[in-house]
Amino acid sequence: MDSEVKDYLDVTDDLLPADEREDLAVNKVADVALRKRSAAPNQIAFVRYLALPFIFLTVALLGGLRLSGLDSSFVFLKPPLLCLIFAAILLVMFFRARLIDLEGWFSESFSLLKNLANGAVLLTLFAATTQLFNSLLPEKGLPFWIVAFCFFWTLWNNLFADFDTKKLLRSLGALFGLAFVVKYLVLANLAAPEGRTWFERLTENPGQEAMTWLLDLPRFSAGTGYIQFFAAALFLIGLYLLPASTNDYEA
């Protein structure tokens, strides 16, 4: 028995006859159940139409954010066209894997407002996915094309191969993790620090200066890696909270 109903019966135990207490108990149980059923959709709507867009828009903001290596000032980089293409392919793969059921998000049985709200949520997902690729891809030079080719090869193979949802998630997780390590641990440590003259960098660490010049590595502050790690974690949280369908609202 629900604790709220039990407490209510304890209060009315000595005040009412047994038959009236029984009728009141039935009414109280129905009232508590109704309030619980009405509270659940409100909580779900809050998560899906307020929390999820906030998470994805935060990822979209942080994904293009960098810290200058000279004075740690904020630098915002727009995503290359490849990032939009990769994001579109990844969303198609989510639809194929039924991680997102298109008919569960858009339907003639839904109201116009609900269809528009669902479209807005998926639009923020697309923006966050685009900026996630922008976060993981090196900014320019040979590393950009190498990592971009790895992304393209993996996405293309998964798009047309026999579909396996678990295999897809494992391959994407491994690819994203490897790209993060390559960019923010390997390439970031190969880049020569900013704030020194060319002659000072060349005499103190000629190998690092040579790699920076050959690979055309940008000089960002180490804090950039922390920001992008937080953005990637937020993106995963948003995917976890994202429902495959919104048909449960019609219940």
Image: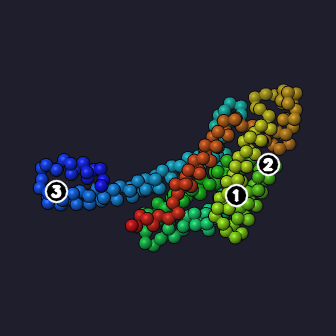
Q: Quick one: label 1 or label 3, which is nearer the N terminus?
A: 3
Furthest residue toward bottom: 108
Secondary structure under the numbered disc 3 in the rendered image: helix
Q: Residue at the location (67% across, 39% down)?
A: 224
Mark 2 to mark 3 CA distance (whole Å): 76 Å
Mark 1 to mark 3 CA distance (whole Å): 61 Å
Give the labeled residue for mark 3: 21
Q: Residue at the location (33% across, 56% down)?
A: 36
Q: Residue at the location (67% across, 68% down)?
A: 163
Q: Quick one: label 1 or label 2, which is nearer the N terminus?
A: 2
As displayed, is residue 95 above or below residue 203? below
Secondary structure under the numbered disc 2 in the rendered image: helix
Q: Quick one: label 2 or label 3, which is nearer the N terminus?
A: 3
Q: Which mark is residue 143?
A: 2
Give the mark toward the camera: 1 or 3.
3
**Figure quadrant of residue 202:** top right
Residue kind at label 2, given as amino acid type:
Pro
Give the mark toward the camera: 2 or 3.
3
Spot occupied by residue 34 in the image (x, y as percentages of width and height): 30, 59
Give the labeled residue for mark 1: 171
Spot occupied by residue 131 in the image (x, y as percentages of width and height): 63, 51
Spot occupied by residue 148 in the image (x, y as percentages of width and height): 75, 55
Neighbor class of circle 1 (other Cα within 10 Å; few <14, some 14-19, many 20+) is some
Q: Residue at the location (47% across, 56% down)?
A: 48
Secondary structure under the numbered disc 1 in the rendered image: helix
Q: In the figure, is residue 9 to the left or right of 216? A: left
Residue kind at label 3, given as amino acid type:
Arg
